[in-house]
Image: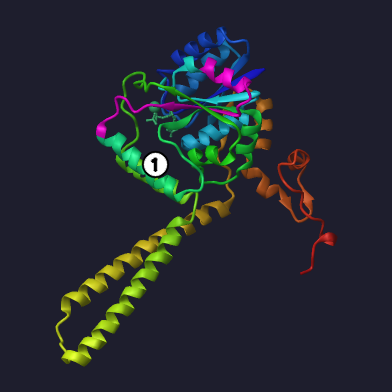
Amino acid sequence: MLLSVVVPCHDEERVLPELVAQVTAVMQDIPADFEFVLVDDGSRDRTVQVLQELNARDPRVRYVSLSRNFGKESAMLAGLAYARGDAVVIMDADLQHPPRLLKQMLELFEQGHDQVVARRDREGDAFGRSLLARVYYKLVNSLVEVRIEDGVGDFRLLSRRAVDALLQLGEYNRFSKGLFAWIGFPTATIDYRNEARFGGDASRWTLRRLLNYGIDGVMSFNNAPLRLAIYVGLVVTMLAFGYAGYLVVAAVVGGIVVPGYVTLVAAVIGLGGLQLLFLGVIGEYVGRIYYESKHRPHFLVAAASDELSRAEAVRRAPARRTTVLMGNWVAPEAQADVDRGYVRPPVPADRRSTR
Ligand code: UDP
Ligand code: MG
């Protein structure tokens, strides 16, 4: 039994030695082998050198260094692609995800859970922020087809088949909270107390980033905003007909009264605003299609602790598959995915329906 600990790291030179020490200490009491997959996400500090040092000291500390900052989602994906374990734990570098939970996570994994999720309480958060979070999750869950829980983040254990399932989801816009919920499988939850960031830095989540993340959450998992546009359009049209009828009747009964300037301006401005709003919504979806249709890889690797694993990871990274199956030709590196049932082989030309 091998456990992989995947950690996305962006400018984390100060915490990494401490993180590795703490996890290694915890793993001493656990009857399982482990490896680290530390993913340097384009750090500007000495993170890469620190990773090299840690790897030289203990080869179980593997690392991957991405060619630039691709964001946490991509870094996590790279880590999953490189991980070789029968189970994979994803955790943050800053020790906000307490390593002592690993033991309990593994126990629940052994009992047959494919996902073991750590849920933090909101103790110590600013009141405004926790209120915002609660409202946000209420809203998202009323829209989205999968259930997304408050306080549940990326800190979780995934079984091999859960990891493989995630690697099959090739979308470019990765909203992992939604993806984790989407793959399903038996899931267990454990609660933990929220910890302060090691080193005391504040969270890097600014209000603007949170807002963008919120929009991502709503957009990436459903077309409810488009539905909303249809409903609003219907209601406004009906109101307009009603009002027009009223105006006609009023003109017949009371004669023509010209003033109506306020109504006119309000209608023009209000409808103009609504149209812009929903144009934005449609634009957002089109933008997503634009990015998806490029089929760019999710990340580029600049260096890794072991070359062998790099070939393996390239083969597993999801974006690749869309480009190696063309016509009835299967690229050699995609054959393994076809064999494993990850992708359907293309239908040979002579067996394709002509309709
Ligand atoms: N991270 C990353 N790439 C980024 C930003 C963050 O890999 O562009 C990593 C970071 O090193 C950390 C984790 O993602 O391990 C969470 O980041 P942070 O602590 O800043 O976020 P928060 O805990 O406030 O959600
Ligand atoms: Mg953090």
222 or 39: nearer the eye? 222
The span picked out in magenta is: 102-127
Q: Name the outermost residue toward the front.
A: 253
Q: Quadrant of residue 63?
A: top right
Report helix, strand or loop for mark 1. helix
Q: Position of residue 62 (x, y in %)?
A: 58, 20
Q: Position of residue 153 (x, y in %)?
A: 45, 32
Left or right placement of residue 230 versus residue 164 in this view: left
Residue 302 visible here: no
Left or right placement of residue 251 versus residue 36 in this view: left
Q: Quadrant of residue 136?
A: top left
Residue 201 in magenta stretch: no
- Residue shown at the point (41%, 25%) measured from the top left: 45
Quarter occupied by the C terminus? bottom right
> The disc labelled 1 sits on which kind of residue?
Tyr
Q: How many marks?
A: 1
Q: Is mark 1 within 8 Å of ligand 1?
A: no
Ligand 1 sits in quadrant: top left
To which residue does mark 1 refer? 137
Label 1 crowd bin: few (<14), some (14–19), many (20+), radius 10 Å: some
Is residue 163 shown above or below 60? below
Q: Position of residue 162 (x, y in %)?
A: 62, 33
50 or 285: nearer the eye? 285
- Residue shown at the point (48%, 11%) measured from the top left: 21
- Residue shown at the point (65%, 43%) measured from the top left: 320
125 or 164: nearer the eye? 125
Quarter occupied by the N terminus? top right
Q: Position of residue 321 (x, y in %)?
A: 67, 45
- Residue shown at the point (76%, 56%) measured from the top left: 327
